[in-house]
Image (tube, rainbow, N blue to C red):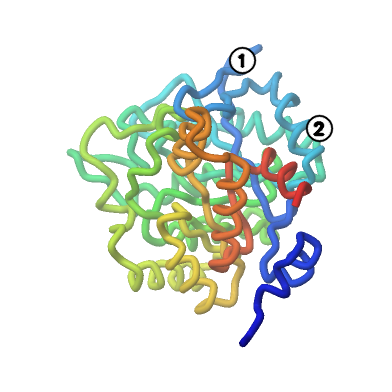
Amino acid sequence: MNRNRRLRQNSTMRSLVRETTVLPSELIYPIFVTEGRGIKEEIPSMPGVYNYSVDRLYEIMEQVVNSGISGVMIFGVPVHKDSKGSEAYRWDGIAQKGIKYIKNHYPDIVVVADICLCAYTNHGHCGIVNEGEILNDETLPYLAEMALTCVQAGADMVAPSDMMDGRVEYIRKVLDNNNFKNVPIMAYSAKYASAYYGPFRDAAHSAPKFGDRKTYQMDFANVKEAMREISNDIEEGADIVMVKPALAYLDVIKEASQRFDVPVAAYNVSGEYAMVKAAALSGWIDEKRIVLENLYAIKRAGANIIITYHAIEAVQWLKEI
């Protein structure tokens, strides 16, 4: 008889032989920055997550610093929206203001700028639209300009999430030509057209006004296509690749981590967060245990970096085990 239970008999023994660890330094916390002053507004579909005006960012940033997590990902929530998402690439846009504030006050925190037009366009799509068609090549200069202004504001890394073909190469060239050769790109390489994004769209007011995003985000049935997307992004200059969402795509994370020799990030998205929170608030699940189990599953699948709204709470729970 193989007595495998010998190594499970108490918490110290289990910790000694544990195969997978989740460290605070591997977590990134997403932050929504909105225009105005004195604003800390809870997002109804994401309990515990808020829209912050720049003057109140210190409230969440103090928690980030004290938690020991490595970084934050910034999403701007502008007041003005237009057909070309012009607020996305203004030097004094809301995302750029948030980035500048954080880097000025918390220089040791890694700031990742999400690069996409969806929250800034009046139609809610991630690219330029003409007669109902989302244009790929015409969108690339706008994305690159957004990346450049975010880096000029102080972003340590840019993360294009739009899923336009060729955007990594275009952004890389623009950054290089402006003396930002050392700024890495974390590409949303395998971003699926998912129903798990609903609460995020509430937070960023970015739901499409017509149609959907299935012509540019990936079909959730496909894995081989995800590997092609990731391979293309690496060839174009991506330093880190991402799979999004995480929990329903653990197989994709696993495949990517085994096939490619670059760091793999996974985004534990808003819908995944909201389901856990809703069930916990109803008393149906043990939130702490569920969150840690989910994070360990993502890490076990092969993710090196986890972007999650649970990050700050999870650090406290990780200390307990």
x%, y% of residue 17? 74, 72
Depicted 212 relative to depicted 87: above or below: below
Drawn side of residue 20 relative to residue 256, left or right: right
- The residue located at (40%, 41%) in the rendering is 197
Drawn side of residue 266 relative to residue 64, left or right: left
Amino acid type at circle 2 is His
Amino acid type at circle 1 is Ile
Considering the numbered disc 2 on the image, is that residue within a helix, a strand or a loop?
Answer: helix
Depicted 314 relative to depicted 198: above or below: below
Quarter of the figure with the N terminus: bottom right
Question: How far is mark 2 from mark 1, CA to CA?
Answer: 19 Å
- The residue located at (41%, 72%) in the rendering is 227
Dot label at residue 39: 1
Please say whether residue 210 is visible from this viewpoint: yes
Considering the numbered disc 1 on the image, is that residue within a helix, a strand or a loop?
Answer: loop
Query: Mark 2 or mark 1, which has the lower sequence index?
Result: 1
Residue 17 versus residue 255: which sits nearer the camera? 17
Location of residue 61 by image quarter: top right
x%, y% of residue 216? 30, 53
Using a 10 Å C-alpha cutoff, classify the residue at mark 2 as few (fewer than 14 neighbours), some (14 to 19) or many (20 or more): few
x%, y% of residue 69? 74, 47
Drawn side of residue 30 relative to residue 128, left or right: right
Residue 230 versus residue 19: which sits nearer the camera? 19
x%, y% of residue 283? 51, 31
Residue at the extreme bottom: 1
Residue at the extreme top: 38
- The residue located at (58%, 39%) in the rendering is 287
Using a 10 Å C-alpha cutoff, classify the residue at mark 1 as few (fewer than 14 neighbours), some (14 to 19) or many (20 or more): some
Residue 275 versus residue 254: which sits nearer the camera? 275
Depicted 25 relative to depicted 40: above or below: below
Please say whether residue 150 is visible from this viewpoint: no
What residue did someone put label 2 on?
105
